[in-house]
Amino acid sequence: MFPATACRTATLDPIDAPTHVIELVERAGRYPDRTALLAPEGTFSYDDLLKVSGAAATRLLAGRDDLAGARVCYLIPPGWDHTVVQWSIWRAGGLAVPLATSHPPTELGHVLDDAQPEAVIVHPTLLGRVEAVAAERRLPVLQTPALLAEGAAALLPGVDEARPALMLYTSGTTGQPKGVVLSHANVRAQIESLSEAWGWQEDDHIILHLPLHHVHGIVNVLCSALWNGAMCEVLPRFRAVDVWERLARADATLYMAVPTVYRRLIDAWDAADPDTREAWTAGARACRLMVSGSAALPVPTLERWETLTQHRLLERYGMTEIGMGLSNPLEGERRPGYVGTPLPGVEARLVDDEEQQVEDGASGHIQIRGPAVFTEYWHRPEETNAAFTADGWFRTGDQAVVEDDAWRILGRSSVDILKTGGEKISALEIEEVLRSHDEVSDCAVVGIPDVDWGDRVCAAVVVTDQATITPEELRSFAKSRLAPYKVPKDVQLVDGLPRNAMGKVTKPAVRDLFAPEDDE
Ligand code: MCA
Ligand code: AMP
């Protein structure tokens, strides 16, 4: 067993010792014997994490001193391998770019083209998804068994906090998804803020089934647990019954998920027999905190969850670019339908269209400032510039109102940004793909309010000949090119799209073509 600091500096003269150690990594040396991960691959201590990531970082360096911010993409299911690879990229001085395990090759190709990584690390089970895409771009592919094999750790570089740590892809109102760059300092600020606000402790045990290409899974769950010496239990995928069975063991203290997941858990509880329900409910009550976020939590879902588990969900508001911004309190009143107040270290304000702060009680655009806010959109200086005011406030694109000191999210300013099952998507990106079909002459994508998904993605499509193409064929076409959650759930063939006097498609009128789901 050797703590990170010892293994890194053992052979060094103090004068050569790296001056900057990634704090998350350094802290792991405090809890060598504690369990860091209960993963599909096994049970691993903090010491294991330090040793294996040190050896893997050394392999990534391949004799170099420092990856110096080189991007390394990785396509690995959530679990031990995924976590070690993230740490090894960081410890070698690289910029970690997680790829989404649900993405088809076309979407993966976009990230590879944009991020220009020096290599792609892949788990053997996902090799088929990325091998050809990487080969087309002449990118080396490293497989996890070889990368994570036992080995010695060499001297690893010092990594200044200002250096980029993570790049996460997010959809916007223009073009394809863009890379949001978070520095090590940004990640640390996000973790510290949540550790303080939500009272993370060493003996916490959190269940993780969220994807690991988003802030929610990476920072709020995985990194926050590891920062605090806590245990993160990774489930291979989300299945409502599996989550309930884990909760029923009554040893998890924390649980975090998106509203769609809570809704699915409620459905599974309703479908269970009385003894099972009782066991599930009793286990869930043993948790100290359950959090919902990434999309608006419908009040009926919050209320039903409270009836089942006696937990009033703590709803919070965040964004890839800012981490978490607003949160209901750990102690004190959590108002249904509200997301609380700014988190520690976060400055939040509401402004009008002229960017003047609004009067108390008036609605406005949310702007956020603070050390957790991202550094830049990768290689997009103009978009980065446009996202910030001259005095450093980030324009979130969301609207809110403050009522009796609590913030209530009113939605997004753009009709073209949708949230489905916690995934942010751009209607314009989906339209572009549909339009690339030979028989599609025009289309419009909208979000229809839906109790399960938040927004249900729907497309009205004008085709050249309705006799030769079906909505299902268009869905398959979209599925081969887009992430599954972007594929319209409902495609309607229409003779023409509703337009205003200027000839612009009127999205509210497009929405009227699709029946909204009944609310509870
Ligand atoms: C899967 N499908 C979806 C979604 N996920 N459709 C719409 N929206 C989705 N999010 C599709 C599948 O492709 C499939 O399509 C059908 O729905 C049923 O799939 P199923 O297997 O039941 O879905 P699942 O695999 O169980 O996934 C549902 C999920 C998942 C568990 C809700 O989407 C999820 O984990 N979402 C969380 C995402 C997240 O972590 N977001 C945080 C980003 P078909 O039947 O046609 O094949 S936001 C963030 O990080 C900020 C900072 C924040 O504030 O947190
Ligand atoms: P993403 O860019 O995927 O990080 O998604 C961030 C967006 O999710 C925010 O800009 C909001 O629109 C939305 N969001 C996150 N949390 C909440 C919440 N509690 N209520 C409403 N919307 C939310």
Image (cartoon, rainbow, N blue to C red):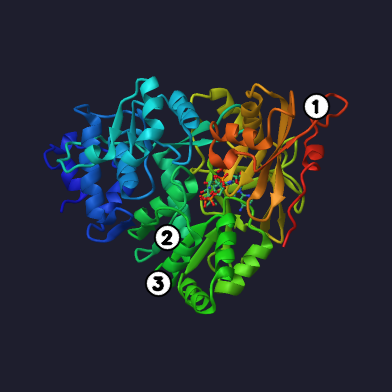
Q: Sort mark 2 into few (<14), some (14-19) or many (20+) by Cα contacts within 10 Å.
A: many
Circle on res. 207: 2
Left or right of 287 in this view: 29: left
Q: Nearer the viewer, residue 207 or 71?
A: 207
Left or right of 211 in this view: 261: right
Q: Nearer the viewer, residue 156 or 436?
A: 436
Q: Earlier in the sequence, mark 2 or mark 1?
A: 2
Give the amino acid at mark 2.
Ile
Give the amino acid at mark 3.
Arg
Q: Tag 1, which secondary structure? A: loop
Q: Which residue is mark 3?
A: 249
Left or right of 236 in this view: 475: right
Q: Sort mark 3 into few (<14), some (14-19) or many (20+) by Cα contacts within 10 Å.
A: some
Residue 470: x percent and y percent?
68, 34
Quadrant position of the C terminus in the picture? bottom right
Residue 142: x percent and y percent?
28, 32
Query: Which residue is located at x 46 percent, y 73 percent?
Result: 283
Question: Image height check: is 189 above or below 414?
Answer: below
User: In the picture, residue 435 is in which quadrant?
Assistant: top right
Q: Tag 3, which secondary structure? A: loop
Q: Ligand 1 within 8 A of label 2's CB?
A: no
Query: Which residue is located at x 35 percent, y 54 percent?
Result: 226
User: In the picture, residue 10 is in which quadrant?
Assistant: top left
Q: Nearer the viewer, mark 2 or mark 3?
A: 3
